[in-house]
Image (cartoon, rainbow, N blue to C red):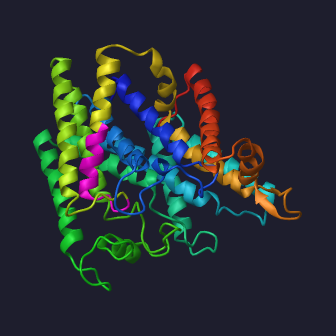
Amino acid sequence: MTKERLTSLDVFRGFTILLMTIVNNPGSWDSIYAPLEHAEWHGCTPTDLVFPFFVFIMGTAIPFAMPVKHFDGAVFNKILVRSLRIFCLGLFLSVFSRIHLFGLEGIPLLAVRLVIAFAVAYALLGNFSMKIKTILAVGIFLILISLAFSGLEHFEDTRIPGVLQRIAIVYFFSSILYLKTNLKTQLVVLATLLIGYWILMAFVPVPGFGPANFDKGTNLAAWLDNTLLNGHLWIASKTWDPEGILSTLPAIGTGILGMYIGQLLNLQICKTEIIKKTAITGAALVIAGLFWNIIFPINKSLWTSSYVLYTAGIATICLTILYYIIDVQGYKKWTKFFLIWGVNPMIVFFFSGVIPRVLTAIKVQNPEIGGEEISLQTAIYKHGIAPLFENPLNSSLAFALAYAAFWSIILWIFYKKKLIFKV
């Protein structure tokens, strides 16, 4: 099921993961440049492009990872296990800070959590036989889900949805759709998902709230999340989730559009013609998204149908430009930095989620206020980065860039040693 790689796609993935790392790790959430913040509700900032870009890229990679359309039990098992592995990586991030064993506290407890995190990463990213992968993925999934619904104090409000969880679901359905259907059927499914989601959100009354609406917390998607996953939702809202159940349907549409572009890039025709097709498609998607925005606002948290078209269009245009520069014109010398990020996305996704949790859990004395404890992450920022800058926006960004530089060193070492961690 492999294996041709498209350099421009790896570079695009690397840029997306790098941007994700920067926007997710500011020095202070109170001091962020506007382009590095999510839109408050409706609308789309550069930051709101990161998640759909990654989903789109995943979809684009499917035709390259599966050049021969062959579907049987073994292929289905590979897709299912890979999806479970991705899902478990995301779910573990929700569980990590809740792990309590043997009454341990402080650094000993943190050490135990880190050991478990490395064990989980090894089990889910290690290069094992398919049989072992299946056993580990199913076993870890059952353990994590059992903990979430066990009723145990520390795990009772474990968040079930999440970024990696949504990516896993989209990958599962997109892969099967690609292998089992032709392009025409895939586009019909895409239209059905996007139009069907709009009809549900725009016209179906919301139980307990009244008429259909697109408002925060009172829309149909929020009602469904709270009904089916009550107590296991995003901690910032508690009653709805930006990666919730209903909004995952149009997210599959983002994956399908990525698959469509991947199939265009795989056409055995002149590369100039491919560029024309993808450029026209990208522009058409952006325009269609903007028009749909008039009645179904572009919104990341709802993953609206207009948001799907708009972000996929921008992603298509970006990939088209990179494809022309890198794979057609052959300008590749500058790509190495982004390639080291692009070939190891899951290890970054997972541990860039673990590390901030660790730095937040470690408490140190604040030299400014005697006796007060602050997190190690806050101490590093306030006493190591912030004093170097007059503008708090610049110091907050500098912290994020320093964290990205830290990861760049790690990924460069992995790249030089040919260490690629795949699910």
Would residue 157 be found to the left or right of residue 118 on screen? Answer: left
State the image quarter where residue 258 is shown: top left
Residue 229 x %, y %: 43, 72
**24 to 12, vertically: above or below:** below
Q: Residue furthest right?
A: 370
Q: Is residue 70 visible?
A: no
- Residue drawn at point x = 60 percent, y = 58 percent: 30
Judge whether residue 306 is colored magenta: yes
Please report the bounds of the magenta region as a residue range: 301-315
Quarter of the view holding residue 110: bottom right
Is 61 rendered above or below residue 174?
above
- The relative height of residue 145 versus residue 186 in the rendered view (above or below) is below
Q: Position of residue 383 (x, y in %)?
A: 78, 48
The verdict on residue 84 being magenta is: no
Residue beneath the point at 18% across and 54% down: 291
Q: Magenta span: helix, strand or loop, mainly? A: helix
Quarter-of-image position of residue 78: top left
Q: Residue extending furthest left?
A: 184
Residue 392 percent across, percent down from the top left: 64, 50
In the rendered view, tell whether residue 93 sits above or below residue 151: above
Q: Report the residue that reaches farthest toward the front.
A: 390
Query: In percent of the image, x 48 and y 40: which residue is there?
Result: 19
